[in-house]
Image (spheres, rainbow, N blue to C red):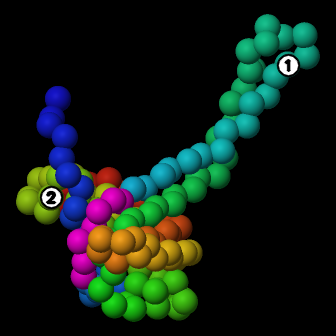
């Protein structure tokens, strides 16, 4: 079993070019899949079939606010690639690539005695797990 890590590594690519900057405080990807349950008449109460359906990939991250680059992703139509490195960018470490992402939301947080932060959410067309 490996040790826990602090997830602060990630990059957003638009057209193959990394954009923006900032300290990421949280990040995450949620993968869901629809599953339909079918039951027979007079059956045991257990499903007689499970049919797999659509998949959905959504993500979110929070970072220090630097400029309007990320806000413009939400307002624009350009697709982006979000790459997260849970254990850092060293060769062989895990890498999660969210492809063809459309940014769907942004929020700002301006708490007293804290760094101005922004949170961004996105929907991805694909997610792949690999290594750096």
Residue 24 falls within the magenta-colored stretch? yes
Residue 109: numbered disc: none
From the viewer's perspective, tell me whether residue 4 is left or right of residue 90: right
Q: Name the residue nearer the viewer: 105 or 36.
A: 105
Which residue appears at 17% of the width and 29% of the height?
A: 1
- Specify whether 111 is left or right of 44: left
Q: Would you say residue 2 sits in the magenta stretch? A: no
Residue 125 visible at all: no
Q: Identify the residue shown where x is 18% and y is 47%.
A: 5
Separation of marks 1 and 2 at Cα, in angstroms: 49 Å
Please tell me in which quadrant of the rendered image residue 2 appears: top left
Which residue is at a point 82% across and 22% down the rendered structure image? 39
Quick one: quadrant of the C terminus? bottom left
Residue 33 placement (x, y as % from top left): 59, 46
Which disc number belongs to residue 40?
1
State whether residue 11 is above or below residue 130.
below
Foreground mark, 1 or 2, reads: 2
Does 118 sit above or below residue 49?
below
| Residues in magenta, as a range | 21-27
Between 104 and 15, the residue placed more toward the observer is 104
Q: Which residue is mark 2?
A: 88
Mark sitting earlier along the chain (1/2): 1
Q: What is the quadrant of residue 27 in the picture?
A: bottom left
* Identity of the residue drawn at 46% across and 86% down: 71
Q: Is residue 100 left or right of residue 92?
A: right
Percent from the top left, x then y, of residue 75?
55, 89
User: Does the image show residue 70?
Assistant: yes
With 110 as the anchor, is 122 left or right in this view? Answer: right
Horizontal and vertical percent position of residue 20: 28, 85
Q: Single out the residue that lies furthest toward the front.
A: 112
- Crowd tier of the residue under label 2, counting other residues whose Cα lies within 10 Å: few below 14, some 14–19, many 20 or above: some
């Amino acid at each position: 079993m490996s040790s826990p890590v602090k997830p602060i590594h990630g990059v957003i690519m638009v057209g193959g070019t990394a954009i923006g900057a900032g300290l990421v405080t949280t990040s995450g990807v949620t993968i869901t899949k629809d599953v339909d349950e079918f039951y027979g008449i007079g059956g045991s109460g257990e499903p007689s079939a499970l049919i797999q359906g659509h998949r959905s990939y959504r993500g979110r991250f929070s970072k220090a606010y630097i400029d309007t680059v990320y806000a413009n992703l939400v307002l624009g139509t350009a697709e982006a690639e979000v790459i997260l490195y849970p254990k850092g960018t060293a060769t062989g470490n895990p890498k999660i690539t969210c492809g063809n992402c459309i940014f769907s939301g942004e929020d700002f947080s301006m708490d007293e005695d804290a760094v101005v932060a922004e949170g961004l959410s996105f929907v991805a067309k694909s997610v792949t797990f690999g290594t750096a």
